[in-house]
Image: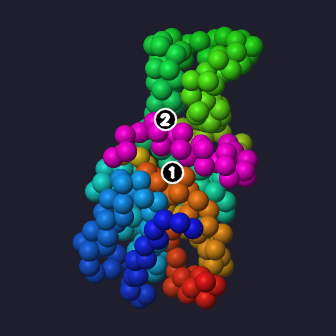
Amino acid sequence: MQGCVYILAFEQQATAIPAGIASRIAWLDLHQSQRCQAIPTLSVLRGKVIAARQLWILWSDQAHRQTGVGVYTSIAALLETWLAAIAQHDNLRSRILQSLAALTHRPEAELTAFLVSTSDYQRQLFWQQLAPLSEDADQLRAILTWLPDSPGLEPQTKHLASEDSSTVLASFAAVARLFPQSVVPGLLALLPEDNLGEAALTALGQLVEAVPQIPVALVLTAAQGQGLLDLL
């Protein structure tokens, strides 16, 4: 994987955020400054899961960013976790519709009414005409279908994306472009206890290379971290 991987080593016996929290926040700020320069950066938090999660959420709060937290099973599952976390605190549907309305030079309310009341044929024609105007059209259409009708509700139980990594990465990128760079929501990936994280590290590396503006971190326990080192 090209780009940068940073390791933050926690005290292994810690049951809460370890001492030196200010220095760890400073390290995460440094990682973010790299992202602001479009340098692919994955923050790897090694140590107690609870402490790592608390650190990431604390940093996100101080940076005024939303963040999703999920267990890695696939990059597609993490996309759904990320979008669901965003939709809980932000009107993601409205952000998408505002973006589409700007492309089509029509008010958001008018576009919303059109998509709700028009026929399947007319909607299909609309998306076909939109495709040349936006590289994100297919991804935003799928996300709109998946999202709940109102903010704060749970997304549909059906899966959003296939396991095709290019489609998933394109969806991450499409949503990231809806936000100013300073507030693009972050993502923290945890691992099942029996998972050494090789697949997760590869997938998240691909994510930060494709969409470097998303703050992404991976939590590794001491055993998982040592297991990965043994494989390298």
- Which residue occupies the foreground of this view, 175 or 36? 36
- Residue 115 versus residue 22 in the image, above or below: above
**Left or right position of 81 against 4:** right
Quadrant in which the C terminus appears:
bottom right
- Residue 120 versus residue 197 in the image, above or below: above
Residue 141 placement (x, y as % from top left): 63, 30
Q: Residue at x 47, y 54 (%)?
A: 212
At label 2, the amino acid type is Leu
Question: Which region of the structure is painted magenta?
Answer: 160-182
Q: Crowding near pointer 1: few (<14 within 10 Å), some, many (20+)? A: many
Query: Which residue is disc 2 drawn over?
Result: 92
Earlier residue among tags 1 and 2? 2
Asked whether residue 111 appears in the rendered view, the answer is yes
Q: Residue at x 57, y 68 (%)?
A: 1
Q: Nearer the viewer, mark 1 or mark 2?
A: 1
Q: Residue furthest front?
A: 2
Q: How is the image coloured?
A: rainbow
Residue 69 placement (x, y as % from top left): 50, 59
Q: How many marks?
A: 2
Asked whether residue 58 appears in the rendered view, the answer is no
Q: Crowding near pointer 2: few (<14 within 10 Å), some, many (20+)? A: many
- Which residue occupies the foreground of this view, 18 or 3? 3
At label 1, the amino acid type is Val
Contact, mark 1 vs mark 2 (Cβ under 8 Å): no
168 in the magenta segment = yes
Q: Main secondary structure of the magenta part?
A: helix
Residue 75 placement (x, y as % from top left): 63, 57
Query: Which residue is disc 1 drawn over?
Result: 211
